[in-house]
Structure formats: structure tokens, C-alpha cells
Image: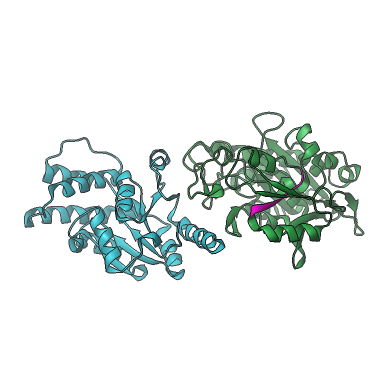
Chain colours: A green, B cyan
Amino acid sequence: MKKVSIYRPTTVDEAIQILSQHGSTASVYAGGTDLLVRLKNRLEQAPSYLVDIKKIDHLRYIKEDAQGGVEIGAATKLAELVDSRLLLEKYPMLVEAIGKISSPELRNASTLGGDLLQEVWCQYLRGGYSCWRNGGYLCYGAIGDNSYYHSAMGGRLCYAVYPGDAATALIPFDARAKLATPQGEKELSIEQLVPGDMLVDGKIQSHVVRYNEILTSVVIPPPRPGVKASFEKLRPRGVWDFAMASLGISLQLRDKTIEDSRVVFGGISGKPYREKTVEAFLKGKTLNAEVGEQAVSVALADAAPLKYNATKIDMAKGLLASGLARLNT
Amino acid sequence: MQTIEALLLEPVGCLAEFSSTPFHEIAVRLFGRREKPISSASRSYWRLLNLIDAAKKPFDEEKKSIVETLEVEAVDAASIYEDVVPALAELKSMGIRLFVASSLSRMAVLKFIERNSLGEFLSGVHTRDEAGGVKSAPLQSALDGASLSRENTMFLTDTLEGIKTARCVGVHPILMMNDPDEAQRLAMHNPAGGVVSLNEIPDFIRVLAAQNQRG
């Protein structure tokens, strides 16, 4: 394992100071289910200083806010989200989605913030190849085995898929993220938080959080009347694996008429892929089997599969069909 | 890698999809080669360049005419990659100096540039005619002619010969990963980097600039 030094700040301000001091050689450490693997694999890009935020109060909670929405601390364990009666009552689709992340053991350690901001799980990066995210200048996934961990929707230097499920499930609820920064609090939509391969502080990463910023919480607006939501996921095994393709979908219905929708695919692109063509198609339509078939036919027209992963697009379209069918029952 | 200030571009394999047939035909007619044609235009082209280089003498007028005619035919039939014009426009707007450094004849290169309206993006054109040779000669000509710093210059290529040629003149060989299987093989020859599309070069250069700024 790569040698590291660990700080244990007790306030967010102190953590930001430490992160600012060490620049991009430091990283926030909470659940560790991503970070410790990178350290064990001795990746060049792995940090030398860990800023353990578990001792900081007020980062681990699930609470209802004054408007009837829910705020979740970034250090809240995924298992706590799965067990939350409040979340189950207000956003059952989110609970279902989180329950499909990884395995029960890992959900006991992983945090919501960690799931949102985790590094990609490309086998070349994790295997120590000198790729774009590990000190090199070439994407081995684009030319090697890209059947599982790589984008079928194009790329930008790095072709790994964004691996998290929480973002795919949160975007349909228009959830937002709060960040603590040296300049104060910053708020972003989840789409803005994880826009795909970005150059941030000289590094390629899936999210926009800078080296001296900390994701502190996620805020989900109150559930809207008439909204039905569904989460679908395909993976090679029933637990532990990442999504080959996933779908978070919400429909705002008046009787059977679709007034608004959010359609978000996971596991197929470098970001949670919001399919606005399908959203526009669905608007004003009556939810039925025929509309479901038509929606599938217009979905993912921009697909750009690599040599071995065209099947991801078929899977994603299949999930859209099953998601719409589920919401039609 | 240092911050990049200039890019050397070889049209074959880097800017357009060429047919291998004209290059194979030149090899057959001028050098009497009997190998089976290969489907990759780039490999066919660089195989021909090896023959020209090994001959160590300029073509006589008759042969020159045959070569130029076939090269112009190749240019006429070539399809420019759809990302080339936007990528070159973006690179130029970033202040990157762009040069065609090609082992094709001047006539063929100028035809290629005119046909695809690339002239406005280029800071210079160096072909085998003014360079007095192929492979490294046009690259050397561009470097010397524009006083380019080698460590701040990239050469885009999709062949092993191209990688070796770039290394020979001291510029960074960047692999154009047009064919995944071929690119996988060439990645083992340690190019300085690789891109799937020319569109990625501006981001590539931004990454280098940010990394160098960060120190």
C-alpha cells in the first residue's frame, strides 16, 4: 500500500485548510471503499495525505427540511439510506437504487458523498496503467477491452463510464449538492456536480469538486404530487457489480398524461446521461405501451459505442422499456 | 511532457481516410514490389516511404510524374475526417501553430489543403519536395523553417514508422487511435500519448498546460 499521512480534522473549516495546504496530493477520506483500493493498488494518482472527515460533526444525518424535502449529510452511510423510513416514505425509488449499490458489507462502509464522487473503475486505471487519470496520456479502455467499464456514448480523453448509481437516482428528483469551499458554501445540481470527464486542477475527474472543497450534503426537494419514479439496473451478478446499464426515471403524471419527466441513464457514459430527447418526446403523451415503444426508438440516438460495448445501448433501451412499463402499472 | 506550442500534421492517417491502392500502385510500378496490397492506407503509405527512402535518389521526371499523378488521385479520393476542421479551428484559436509536414509531393499536399479548405488554419506547409526527402525530412524542415522547439511540438501518427520518425527528430509522437486493434499494438511502442479523435488534441494540450502550470 502507498504510504500516507492521515489528518483527522474536527470541523469542515479545518479540513478545508488542510486540503488547501497540500493541494492535489491530499484527498478526503470517509468510507474508503474507493480510496483505499487505489492506495492498495499503489496508483500514481492516489493521494499522499488523507483528510479523514469522519470525526466532523454534522456530515452524517438524514433529516427532513422545512419545505418537506430531505437533506442527507455527505458522510451518511449507504446502508443508513437504505434503512431510512423517511427516505422510503418520500423517495422509495432512491432507496431501491441505493440498495442495489455494491454489497451489504460495502454499503455499511460507503458514504453517499463517496458514491457520488468516486473514481472510475476502469480495469486499466485500477491495474496501474499509465492512463489519463494515472499520470499518462492515453486511454487504454478506448482500444482494449471496453465491454464493461467504458462509455458507449463517446468520451473526452478518458472513456471510462461514471460508475455511481446514486447520481442516476438523484437527478430524477432534481436533487442538489452543497459544497464547503474556502470562499463559503456553494450549491450545484447533481448534474452540475458530475458532468463527466473534466479538467479540474490539472486532473481529469468525473466531478467538479476542487482539491480544497468538500461535498457536505445532498438536498432533495419535496416529492411532487403525481410523480412516479423507477430505478432499473443491469449488472453481471446480482450484487457487488457496477451497472452495465442503469436507469433512473421519474414521470410527473396527471391521470395518464405525462406532464414532465426525467430520464437518466447510468453505466453507459462518462456521466449520468440525461436523455432529454426522450424527455421531450414524452411530454404531453399518454403513458401506455405504444408510447413506451416509441420512446425506446428515439432514445440514445447519439450513441457512439466502442468496439466491444454496443450491447450497453441495447441494455439501456431495454431498461427504458421496462421502466416505463413498470410506471404504467 | 512540456506545454505544446506546435503540431505537425501528416494528412495520410491523421487528417483523412485515404485508400491504400494508389500507394500500393506506386510501389508496384516504380519499385517492382509484389507484396499483396494491405488495407491500411497509412501502412501502405509508410511502406512506400521506406522504399523511397532506401532508394536514396530523387525520382527522374517520368517517375515523378507517375507518383504525383497517383498521389493526386489519392488526395481526390480521400475523405477528410469530420472532426478535422473544428479541431484545427479550435487549436488555432488557442494559439497553437499548425504545420502540414508530409512526405507527399507538394502538388498533392496543396491539392489536399485547397480541396478541404484548410489553408486558413496552417502556419506552414512542408513536403518532400522542399524538404529534399521523406519521413523525417519534412518534419525537420518544419522544425527548422519555423524555429520550433522540439519538446514543445507534437507529431500525430497512426503507424509505428510515424512513431519512430517523430522520436528520430525529437518531437512527441501522438498516436491517432483510428483502428483499436492496431492502436493496441502500437501503444506498446510507447508513444508520448494517444487520442481517439483529433477533437481531443485541444483538451490534451490544455491538460499539459495545466499540469505544467501546477508544476
Q: Residue at x 67, y 57 (%)?
A: A22
Q: Residue at x 41, y 65 (%)?
A: B5
The quadrant of the picture occupied by the N terminus of chain B is bottom left
Residue most toward the top? A237
B91 to the left or right of B131 = right
Q: B176 or A245: nearer the eye?
A: B176
B10 to the left or right of A250 = left
Residue A26: give x, y in percent of width and height: 68, 53
Image height of B5 relative to B36, above or below: below
Residue A106: give x, y in percent of width and height: 76, 35
Visible in this render: residue A165?
A: yes
Look at the image and give the residue range highlighted in magenta: A25-31
A249 to the left or right of B112 = right
Residue A82: give x, y in percent of width and height: 83, 39
**A60 in the magenta segment:** no
B165 to the left or right of A59 = left
Residue A2: give x, y in percent of width and height: 63, 41
The quadrant in which residue A324 appears is top right
Residue most toward the right? A66
The quadrant of the picture occupied by the C terminus of chain B is bottom right
Q: Residue at x 11, y 56 (%)?
A: B65
Visible in this render: residue A197?
A: no
Total numbered circles: 0
